[in-house]
Amino acid sequence: MSRAEPAPGQPARGTRAWYARRRARVVTTSRMVEPTRFRESFGRYFEDFEIGHVYEHRPKRTITQADNVWFTLLTMNTHPLHFDEEYGKKSEFGRCIVASPLTVAILVGMSVTDVSHKAIANLGWKEIRMTHPVYPGDTLSAETQVVEKRESRSRLGAGIVHVRTRGFNQHQTLVCEFDRSILVPKRGHAIED
């Protein structure tokens, strides 16, 4: 059998079905920790990231006004546009808007299972852009594209992955975009290995 021919019952390499099957295998796995006991494992190793790949994150998340108020109280953000309905009505938005750090936090959280669940460290965020207001009641979805990767110069068992995450509302309007760098272990070097 040539490399181009898939095994019987398997999708051809490089097809959408092949990537979907590979993604499912990589993101969520389980391993035996003792006889009759298994532990699920999430995330990707450095070797699993390929430049240009896009990971669609699920589940989606609807942001409520309660989320927004709690977040502003927790972070001591006193801007009334996030929790004062009367103030919001008088603004150019005509209502309260979601605090932008909450939007970023939710999008990062949505990406963890795919992108950084095995991460050793987040190395930084840059170019955070809020491209459209997010309102209480909006449902966010997110996707992350692998932009660049390289082996770590200081850690032999790890590599650095650069990704771009994009968040959309329920109308598929881009609401936020940011770049993130993550230190990711190589296979055999994660805490759980």
Image (cartoon, helix red, strand yellow):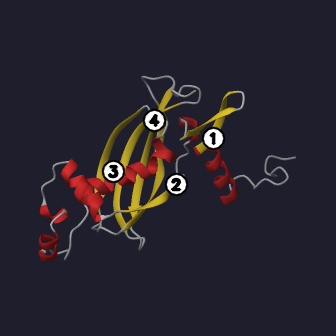
Comparing marks 2 and 4, which lies closer to the viewer? 4
Mark 4 vs mark 3, foreground winner is 3
The answer to whether the residue labelled 2 contacts the one labelled 4, judged by CB atoms less than 8 Å apart, is no
| Mark 3 touches mark 1? (CB < 8 Å) | no
Disc 3 to disc 1, how far (Cα)?
A: 26 Å
Q: Residue under circle 1?
A: 29
Q: Secondary structure at mark 1?
A: strand
Q: What amino acid is found at the position of numbered circle 1 in the picture?
A: Thr
Is disc 3 placed on a helix, strand or loop? helix
Report the residue that reaches farthest toward the front.
36
Q: Position of residue 77 (x, y in %)?
A: 16, 53
Where in the figure is residue 85, as x and y percent of width and height?
17, 71
Residue corresponding to mark 4: 119
**Is tag 3's residue or tag 2's residue first in the polypeptide sequence?**
2
Residue to which mark 2 is pinned: 54
Q: Nearer the viewer, mark 1 or mark 2?
A: 1
**165 is higher (above) or lower (below) than 121:** below
Mark 1 or mark 2, which has the lower sequence index? 1
The tag earlier along the polypeptide, 3 or 1, is: 1
Marks 1/2: CA distance? 20 Å
Mark 4 vs mark 1, CA separation in Å: 16 Å
Q: Residues within 10 Å of mark 4 (few under 14, many from 20)?
A: many
Of discs 4 and 1, which sits in the foreground?
1
Q: Residue at x 58, y 45 (%)?
A: 27
Q: Residue at x 30, y 47 (%)?
A: 126
Q: Disc 1, disc 2: CB below 8 Å?
A: no
Pick the front one: 139 or 177: 139
Res. 105 mark:
3
Quadrant position of the C terminus in the picture: top right
> Eyeballing the image, is 83 above or below 9?
below
